[in-house]
Amino acid sequence: MEQRSTTDLSELIAENFGANATYVEGLLGRFRSNPELVDESWGAYFTELLGGDRAGAAADTSENGRSASGPLVTGETTAEPSVKTAPRAEAKVQTTATSALAPALERVSTTPAPSAQRDGEVVAIRGAALKIVENMEASLSVPTATSQRRIPVKLLGENRRIINKYLAENDRGKASYTHLIAWAIVRALEEYPQLNDAYEVVDGKPARLRREGVNLGVAIDLEKKDGTRSLLVPNIKNPNKQRFSEFLQAYDSVVKRAREGKLQLADFQGTTISLTNPGTIGTVASTPRLMTGQSVIIATGAIEYPAEYQAMAPEALSQLGISQAITISSTYDHRIIQGAESGAFLAMVHELLTGQHQFYDEIFSDVGIPYSPLRWSLDRNPFFTPGDHAREQTIKEASVIELINAYRVRGHLIADVDPLHAMPVLYHPELDIETYGLTIWDLDRVFITGGLAGTESATLREILDILQRAYCGKVATEYRHIQSKEQKLWIRDQIRKHFVSPEPLPSEIKKQLLWKLISAEQFERFLHTKYLGQKRFSLEGCETIIPLLDRLIEDAGDRGVEDITLGMAHRGRLNVLANVIGKFCERIFTSFEGSIHPSFPADEGDVKYHQGAVGERLTARGRKVSLTLSPNPSHLEAVDPVVEGMVRAKQDVLRDRLGTAREEVIDKALPVLLHGDAAFSGQGVVMETLNLAELKGYRTGGTIHII
């Protein structure tokens, strides 16, 4: 295959890659200097482009000794599937955009400008940049038009805040405004697929190319080391066949690879519709140029308040119900797209971003957010509506108090306690602000809280944030059924302390928790590997009980507890013996070997997962805590009342020894019961133990139940 000239190469690259041509020429320069500097997909493309001479690529230079590809571009890598480089005359299908103004360009280029008019250095435009200039001039002959629509983003911003809060809590990244707008564009194409078509000339006749797949091009602005900027437009393949969470990952993957210079050839091929975001630099509205092979390009402007309100305080904007807005434009090929179609498409995007067609409901469901999204609604601020303003405002204040109480009573129903997200997310209207006549416009308005989290008043946004952290986090708390006001207030204070305003765990505690978790897992793995087939009632899948018990012992010791008695069924008993009570591994392994430990002759004939044990723990602060694991020869939880009786007896001994009242020593001994999930609700002995513990003759001052 014969070698092509530098001009031909630049033209081919510019024709095939459009705005990405400069980037691709940089890769070509790399390839020519050393073919190993680019990956296989680019290497195959450049080998074909240069006429199959891969071996001599490094020695290939153009006239005057300059590299045919122009300056070397570093730190970038892009992609697009193999593009045929056969002569244009052989192709039956070709685009019609030609350089109508080429003669004018030629006249300009051959007419020297008077030297007196030159105020600076003249730098000639060459290579791919020159081809882009010609393409831009030629695009003036394509009949394009632009539709614009101004869309309020109040609802978009509020729901995005909820989505990002949930994603952050689960370490799943972040959703930007562009992510959500791009997803709305993908959804709108389902209703208006003709905007995904392309104009072509087939056998000399105009034709519409109907595409089945959608490849969404996303413009990415990159800053080079020398401070110059370049624009890449890779695409996301088939976003119309993805769920939102998949689209989010695909979008982030493309951007990350672009930043790291790891884009592949396939990332540039087949773009059918593009999205650009000049709003990031403050541009309010834009009319971008239409790229080859596409019929529409969408541009988003800056998100801001209307100019006439930008000097107002946030509190005033909140009272007036003024929303930030964004201008979205659609520049389309008027040969196959009509103005009404473009306008209707933008109207659909508007409807989606304001919550119609279940747009946010589907996103929340896919992400796994356990409550419904906020809704678009009219703002009915009592200060600006006819009627009794004071009465209407009082009703709103009372509604907020009702909402707070609803979260205290029902908030646990939507707590995030399903780490596998296997259960469907249920909707509870009692926890929806719309149930109480509140809207998104009230979120930044101040209401009376009735003492919520120690505050007398707060914005509705702050109130919801406190309530969701307190009752809808990783721990579900239900306590309003308790009759004792004192107990309810104590629980409320603990919720505020540990969930609303928690102190971060010290690194030492985190390391200890991790160590105990690793110890529990390795113990089970060792037993499974070493004593394969032997019955052991594994704790596998519930190893977090071990660090939980470890932390419980530490905190109880710091609060003056001197004795802890544990009761449990068979499952997990060996792990508790080894990692909580301590120093029982040798005894356990001897039993698995089929022999009797010389120090424990009584183990003969006993079953290892029936055994009890006694130990002692020295806490990090130097306090001694006695530990007792009660024996349990039953598969059922018959041990529960036994543990309560043991603790009651220990409290009696302490009372008699110290000569004090029971209430003064009742907190020195603590019962802890571990239940199976089915046993807790299904075995009568559990309910009987709970009921007896309330009686004066049986009470032990409280029991910690772990299910």
Image: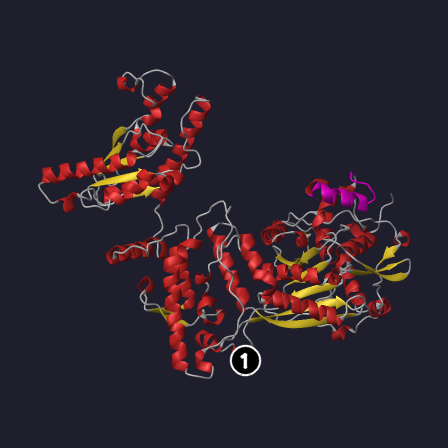
Q: Position of residue 331 (x, y in %)?
A: 72, 68
Q: Position of residue 134 (x, y in %)?
A: 80, 63
Helix, strand or loop status at disc 1: helix
Region rendered in magenta: 38-55
Q: Residue at x 48, y 53 (%)?
A: 168
Q: In this orientation, which residue lies closer to the viewer: 328 or 605? A: 605
Q: In this orientation, which residue lies closer to the viewer: 652 or 360? A: 652
Looking at the image, residue 135 sits to the left or right of residue 654; the answer is right
> Mark 1: few, some, or many residues within 10 Å (few <14, many ≥20)?
few
Which image quarter holds the N terminus? Answer: top right
Where, by quadrant of the figure, is residue 457 drawn? Answer: bottom left
Disc 1 marks a residue whose amino acid type is Glu
Seen in the picture, residue 112 relative to 613 is either above or below; the reply is below
Q: Which residue is mark 1?
A: 308
Q: Position of residue 388 (x, y in %)?
A: 41, 83
Q: Residue farthest to the left?
A: 659
Q: Is residue 599 visible?
A: no
Seen in the picture, residue 85 relative to 582 is either above or below; the reply is below
Q: Residue at x 46, y 47 (%)?
A: 418
Where, by quadrant of the figure, is residue 93 drawn? Answer: bottom right
Is 511 within the magenta? no
